[in-house]
Amino acid sequence: MYTDEGITGTSTKHREGFKRMIADAMDGKIDLIVTKSVSRFARNTVDSLSTIRQLKENGIEVYFEKENIWTFDGKGEVLLTIMSSLAQEESRSISENCTWGQRKRFADGKVTVPFKRFLGYDRGEDGNLVINPEQAKVVKRIYGMFLKGMTPHGIAKNLTDEGVPTPAGKHQWGQTTIKSILSNEKYKGDSLLQKTFCEDFLTKKMRTNQGEVPQYYVENNHEAIIDPETFEMVQRELARRTKGKNRHSGVHLLSGRIKCGDCGRWYGSKVWHSPEKYKRTVWQCNQKYKNEVRCTTPYLDEASVKERFTVAVNQLLAGRDAAIAAYEQGIALTLDTTELKTQQQELLSEMEVLNGMIRQMIRQNATVAQDQTDYNKRFDALSQKFKEAESKKDAVAQQISDIRDRRGTMEDFLRILKQQDGEVTAFSEKLWCGLLDYATAYADGRLTFTFKNGSTFEG
C-alpha cells in the first residue's frame, strides 16, 4: 500500500508515496494499481494523464474503484480525462473558497501570523498576538544593535555565536531574517494584511503583492514591542544605508562616522602591537598610506573620541530651547512638500492627456488610411513629450521622498534633543546614534562634530 497522508493531490512534487509507487511500477514490481477514485490518484489533469500514459506504455494498468474505470479499456482514457478535469475543478473550487474566507478575514481586520515561526509573539486566547517576554527581549536587542550601527549580517553573526534560537527554532541566523524583523510593522503594534498571495492553486506558488489584490492596514491591533518612533527611525536608517554607493560598515560604533580632514575618506580601526601585553586599537584614515601624498591627520583612540563628543553635545544642548524652536520653524518652512505635490499632480494630468492623444492617434491610424511618415513623426513627438513629463514626474517624486527622509531625520533629532534634560556627564550611545551625522579629524588635532541638524561643534 502506498499513501500520502495530508498531502495535496494538485501536484506530485511532494507526494513521496505516489512517486515511490510509480518507481516500483516502472521497475516491474507492479502489474495493477487499484485506486479508490480519480481524485485520490491526482487532482491535476496533466499529471494524471501523463502518469497513466507512462504506466500504459510499460504494461501497467490502473483501476479506479469509484468510477469503475480500467485504463486498458478503450473508453478508459476519455472517462479519465473527464473525471480528472472534474477533480481538478473541485480543487479549484475548494481553493477559491479558502481564498475568499482568508480575504474576508483580512477585510475584517483579523490578523494571523505563523506563530511557530514568528519571534516575539504568541497566540492569545482570542487568537490575537500576545507578547512573549523572553523573545521580545531579542527583538528589542536586534533593533538596538541596528541603531548602534551594526549591519544585519553582523547582528545575525552575533546572535548565532551566542546560540540564540531563530524564529524557526534553528541555530543559524541569516541577514534576511534580521531584515525581515527590522521591517515588520507588527513589532510596532500595526499589521499590513495580504503582503503575499497564491498565484496558482495547482503550483501553490506565492507572490509578493504588488497591487494585484487588495491590502489592508490595521493600526494599534496589538501591544507593540518597539515604539512607533523607534520603528520609523529604523526604516529611515534602512533606506539610508541602501541608497549610498559605499557599503555601510557596522563593525563598530565609530565605523563610518569619522572623516579625514585631508582626503575626506573614513577613519577605520587599526591594531597596534601584536603581543597581547601591548595590544592597542586606534582609529586612523583608511587611505593614510595609500595616496601619493600621505594624510597628516592624527590617529584617535576610542575613549578620546567619546569624551570629546560629550563636550560637543553639551555645547549643542547649551542653547537647546532656542535651537528647538528654530529647528521646528525650519522644518515647517524648508521641508514643506505642498508645492512639489501640486507640481507632481500637474505632471500626472499632463501624462494622462498625452496618453489619451497617443491612443486616439493609434486608433485613427488603424481605421483611416494615413501617410505613415507623417504619422510616425507625430507619434514620436507625442511619445517624446510623454517621456519628458514622466521623467519630470519621477524627479519630483524623488525630491518629495528626499524631503520626507530629511524631515524624518530632523524629527528624530528633535525628539532625542527634547528628551535630554540637563548636561551630559558620560558618553551616550543613544545620543551618538541619534544626534551625530559625522565627525571630522584635522591635521592640527581638532575634532569637530557635525550634527544631523547641520550645526557643527568642536570637541
Image (cartoon, rainbow, N blue to C red):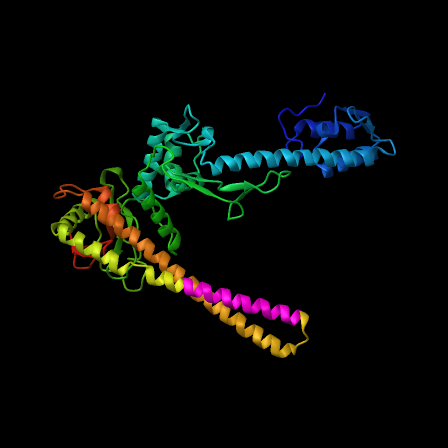
Q: Residue 401: x percent and y percent?
A: 37, 56
Say whether residue 102 is left or right of residue 304: right
Q: Which residue ends up furthest to the right in the rendered image?
A: 74
Which residue lies at the image location 67% right of the left edge and 69% below the top edge? 366
**Quadrant that contains the N terminus:** top right
Which residue lies at the image location 65% right of the left edge and 76% below the top edge? 372
Which residue lies at the image location 63% right of the left edge and 78% below the top edge? 373
Q: Is residue 347 magenta?
A: yes
Say whether residue 404 is left or right of residue 351: left
Q: Residue 408: x percent and y percent?
A: 30, 51
Q: Is residue 13 visible?
A: no
Which range is magenta? Answer: 345-366
Q: Main secondary structure of the magenta part?
A: helix
Quarter-of-image position of residue 63: top right
Q: Residue 375: x percent and y percent?
A: 61, 76
Q: Is residue 425 visible?
A: yes
Comparing 205 with 134, the one in front is: 205
Q: Residue 37: x percent and y percent?
A: 74, 26
Identify whether 370 is placed above or below 110.
below
Comparing 54 with 321, the one in front is: 321
Say whether residue 127 is left or right of residue 58: left
Quarter-of-image position of residue 79: top right
Identify whether 197 is placed above or below 243.
above
Q: Is residue 357 magenta?
A: yes
**Number of marks present in the image shown:** 0
Which residue lies at the image location 83% right of the left edge and 31% below the top edge? 71
Comparing 372 with 279, the one in front is: 372
